[in-house]
Structure formats: structure tokens, C-alpha cells
Image (cartoon, rainbow, N blue to C red):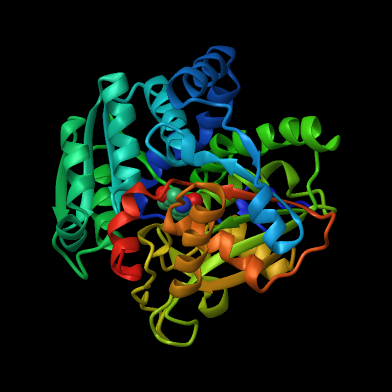
Amino acid sequence: MNYQVNEKGYYGDFGGAFIPEMLYPNVEELRKNYLNIMQEESFQKEFNQLLKDYVGRPTPLYYAERFSKNYNTKIYLKREDLCHTGAHKVNNTIGQILMAKRLGKSRIIAETGAGQHGVATATVCALMGLECIVYMGEIDIARQAPNVARMKMLGATVIPARSGSKTLKDATNEAIRDWINNPMDTHYIIGSVVGPHPYPDMVARFQSVISEEVKKQLLEKEGREDPDFVVACVGGGSNAAGLYYHYLNNEKVGIIAVEAAGEGVLSGKSAATSALGKEGIIHGSKTLLMQTQDGQITEPYSISAGLDYPGVGPMHANLFKTGRGEFISVTDAEAMAAGLELSKLEGIIPAIETAHALAIFETRRFKEDDVVVVNLSGRGDKDLNTYIEHFNL
Ligand SMILES: *Cc1c(COP(=O)(O)O)cnc(C)c1O
């Protein structure tokens, strides 16, 4: 079986490019050029140099001894929390800003929910001196003030989306409208492995540096490139795609995807897409998404803003449907407890998104000599207020 994208932009039954006709030239330009550009020697050189000197790669693969002992297995943490801006998202925005420059674009647009992708985009626009416009739901602007301030400091313009529920999906609609109106000079930086082909594949390739490094680092530490399991939280699925990438077609490596169950999968307040989702089209690709019987997208819920997304990328929909991936959902309370536990046992405060991945060890048992690599997708500084409220700190 091949779990990578095929030439038509599909992962099994999922993916493709379902876009309004007016967007076709933009997406087609990207599709025709992205692989060639990524393979250019000058692109590779600039990308790798920036990942090293600006992002701080390679990120460590850390053996979490006390955490491992607690669960009687061998747990390694891939420290994406140590990337510049505090999460894996910048790997993708660095790649896409270089892509935009080579396509001759001078103006960058992005959508953001909690603001993390907006900050990662504003960061690379500052780095390259390109104009940056970030669409963000009006409600999100109000509840994510520090990230709005960061984007402004970095020189970005934040435009409120005032339609619909005034959250991420409305911001995405505004960004798409902008792109249709500015097809020549604008590149749209999507923040996860979602959207029309080639975005899911392009973003997965930029994030694949994660598993590329894990292979080398594990060889050094364990004498083998392949762990028994790779574990990551899935919002849209980009940090997971990066960790799985070089193991997708190696079925000896178990793939575990962790989704946000919110207050419980059946509580009506959840973002557990694989458990609740049906096939449908969201943001230009065919995938699994949470929807009503007549196909309206349902508003997702999770305590972590980064997992609060009603769909998953097509790669993950295919991993779920084929059974290649094991999907586990974790509630708000379970994730918060795991975040606190990692802090106390290892001195690492994880993002609440990441804490979902760490929470599986309470229920999913591993063998004593299993090597389990967990993607520590981000640091918890941004979540301190949520931790404070939840634990009365
Ligand atoms: C945005 C984010 C996620 C979720 O996005 P993916 O595309 O699923 O990786 C997970 N962890 C952190 C720290 C994030 O910022």
C-alpha cells in the first residue's frame, strides 16, 4: 500500500482540489511548480539554512526517562517546542514563503484561528520583508489578544472576519475571497495539511524534516531508524504528517493519531473528526469532517485552540479509513492532566494540543521494550491562562 499522495492529488479516496473556478489559475500555478521549485538546489540550500540558523533545527530527540518509567515503556519526545515561535508551524511557513518568493509573489495572506499560524506567517513575512494580511474571526480576535498583538508587532495587518460564526472557517472564506481577487501578486499560506491539492502534500513535505531528523537521531540512540510507534495530536494534521512522513509506507512502525474529544466524543462539544466525521468537502478537499445530516459543517469544540478544527487533512482521513493509523480521542480533562504530569516529571510544559498526545499513555498500553516517539508539537507558554484556570494555580 502507498499512503503518500498520488499524481492526481489523492490519498486513497481523499484529497483532490474542489475549488471555485476563479481560484483555478492560482492553485494550478502552484501545482505545476511546487515540486520543481522544492527540488531546486538553491531552494533546498536556503530552506535548510533557515531551518538551522533561524528556526533552530535540528530539534532534539529527548528520551523522557521519568515519564517513560511511569508507563513502563520507552518514550522519546521530538522537541518541536524548541523551534523559533514555539511550535512546528514555522517549518511550513518558512517553506511557503520561499515558495512564494520563487513564484514572484509580493503579498502574503493567511487565515488563523487561535493566531498561532498567523504569528508563524507574520514572522516569516517580517523575515523576508513581504506584506502580510491575516484573516481572523472577530470572536477569535477578542479571545486571542496576545497573538493579535504579536502579529501587529511583526508588521502584519489583521483583518476581522465578521460573517457566520466569526471564527476560523469564516476567516478561511475571507482569505479565499481575497486570493480570488488578487490572483497575480498574492500567495496564500495555508497552515496545515488541508486545502486543495497540492497544499496537503506541500505542507507535509515541509514538515517531513521532523521524521527525517527522528530517523537519524534514533539510529544514534537506539541503533535503529524505526521506532515501534509514532504518536502525534491531529488538528488539521501537519505536525502528525511531519512525524509520520518517512514511516507512512513502513508498516512495522505503528501510527497513532490523537484527536480532541473535548468534553466527550458524544457530548456535542468535541472535535473528534474520525469518530464523528463523514466524507465531505471542506476548504477545497474531500476528507472527513463533522457535519449535520444536510451537510452543514458543525462547530467543533476543544479546550485547545489548535485542535478545534472540524476536519482532518486527506492523508489522515485515508490513514483512518484504511486502518493504517490507530485513532484515539482524548478529552479536555485527560489532556490537561497529562500536560501537568509532563511538567512535573520532565520540566517541560507542553502546549495543550501536545498534551492530548501525551494523555494516551493512561489508557493505551505499550510493551516495556517498545520505542514510542511522541511529537512534542509546541510549548505551553501560550496556554498558561488555561492551565491556571483549570487547576486553580
Ligand atoms: C496548530 C498546532 C497544532 C495542530 O495543528 P496540526 O496541523 O494538526 O499540527 C498542534 N500543536 C500545536 C502546538 C499547534 O500550535
Give how far across and how far down residue 250 sits, in percent.
81, 49
Whether residue 388 appears in this view of the structure is yes
The residue lying at 60 percent from left, 22 percent from top is 39
- For the C terminus, the image quarter is bottom left
Please state if 162 lies on the left or on the right of 262 as rendered: left
The residue lying at 73 percent from left, 67 percent from top is 322
Whether residue 195 appears in this view of the structure is no
How many marks do you count on the picture?
A: 0
- For the N terminus, the image quarter is bottom right
Give how far across and how far down residue 288 sits, in percent.
53, 69
Give how far across and how far down residue 18 sits, in percent.
45, 57
Please state if 45 lies on the left or on the right of 251 as rendered: left
Q: Nearer the viewer, residue 296 or 332?
A: 332
Q: Is residue 302 above or below residue 173?
A: below
Q: Is residue 323 above or below residue 197?
A: below
Q: Nearer the viewer, residue 5 or 311?
A: 311
> Hey, which quadrant is residue 282 in on the image?
bottom left
The residue lying at 43 percent from left, 46 percent from top is 379
Give how far across and how far down residue 263 sits, in percent.
42, 80
Q: Is residue 32 above or below residue 15?
A: above
The residue lying at 14 percent from left, 58 percent from top is 142
> Hey, which quadrant is residue 262 in on the image?
bottom left
Please state if 233 lies on the left or on the right of 113 as rendered: right
